[in-house]
Amino acid sequence: MKKNVKIDDFLKDVKKLGIAGHVRPDGDCIGSCMGLYLYIKENYPHIESHVYMEKIMGKFDYIKDIDKVENEISDTGFDLFISIDLSDRERMAVAGEEFAKTEKTLCIDHHVSNTGFGLYNHVVPDASSSCEVLYDMLDEDKISRDTATALYTGIIHDSGVFKYESTTEHTMNIAGKLMSLGVDFPAIIDEGFYEKTYVQNQILGRALLESILLLDGKCIFSAVNKQEMEFYGVTPSEMGGVVEQLRLTAGVECAIFMYETAHMEYKVSLRSKKYVDCNAVAGYFGGGGHIRAAGCTLRGTVHDVVNNILIHIEKQLKEKGLL
Ligand code: AMP
Ligand code: MN
Ligand code: MN
């Protein structure tokens, strides 16, 4: 792990800073954007920072200054723009145009599919989360409890509470350090990660009920269309967790979950346990992510979309002698 890259090196002469995450921000995106925002506010008070993300779910209200997140951009003239947890420039929410106009840009990330779209890039693909990458760029002695709370949130979300393969001894050491700063870890894990709203549980139940086993039970698939989402009153950012539950099905190696984002357009999420390279599959369709968790957007009927994806999963399972 590259540990010698420090955020301080990028902040010289910076008076105005922009921070941006990805569309439909998840716990790691929110935790890393807010962790950086709070750290800079506390340790570099002369820097005017702006943090840009799409609307954030109420359950993250425990993160300090979450109300300072801007859903629209009106400022300009940034000395530095930092993108965090963003694998692909196209997925930047809110601040894309200003990022493009800014000369000095820094990309902090952990996606294996990230090709480095910033002037400077600090991408650590084997890190559990962007929060882990960011932690290593900070001065440990200058991390407050508020910053620690944001960083702990991202680690919890992207490691699935320390269970995904990307979790390492280093991840656990960082979590321990953050714990020692007094983060309320039971609440971050229970309320921030596991808790679901009533409608989230309903759509989860529906998706599980309608799921189909494919490829000899090695693959599971489910889809939710726009009408169903409207019926239950759930938004795309509330769909997290469905594909993770599908993945847990006994005997399944790979889970596919998709929901309709526009007429005949589906956001696809892929998760695997040990063998399928989800990033490679999503990559065929212009998406990306990590080896065991990736996503992409496809157009067509549910039938077409799932068949197109299955071809690649089947090929991988056959190559690995699992089919
Ligand atoms: P999701 O299935 O949307 O939860 O995404 C799983 C992982 O893949 C996350 O780390 C995302 O940031 C990443 N990802 C999802 N969709 C895309 C995409 N279209 N392009 C690149 N990365 C993606
Ligand atoms: Mn993310
Ligand atoms: Mn992440």
Image (cartoon, rainbow, N blue to C red):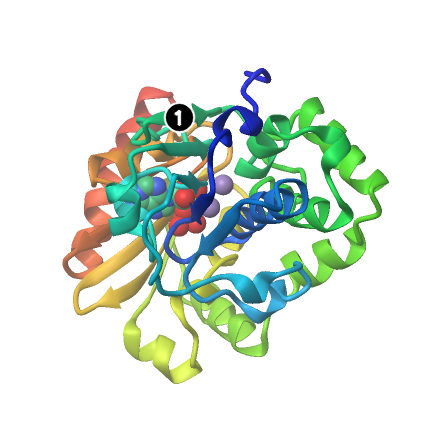
**Residue 161: where, in percent of width, then height?**
67, 44
Q: Is residue 235 left or right of residue 251?
A: left
Res 255 visible: no
Q: Residue at x 79, y 55 (%)?
A: 186
The one of 26 and 291 positioned closer to us in this rendering: 26
The type of residue carrying mark 1 is Asn
Res 189 visible: yes
Q: In this view, does 139 lie to the left or right of 184?
A: left
The one of 114 and 77 positioned closer to us in this rendering: 77
Disc 1 target residue: 121
Q: Which residue is drawn at 37% across and 21% down?
A: 320
**Quarter of the figure that contains the C terminus:** top left
Q: In this view, does 313 lie to the left or right of 220?
A: left
Q: Which residue is drawn at 44% across and 46% down?
A: 16
Disc 1 element: strand
**Quarter of the figure that contains the N terminus:** top right
Is 34 located above or below residue 164 in the figure? Answer: below
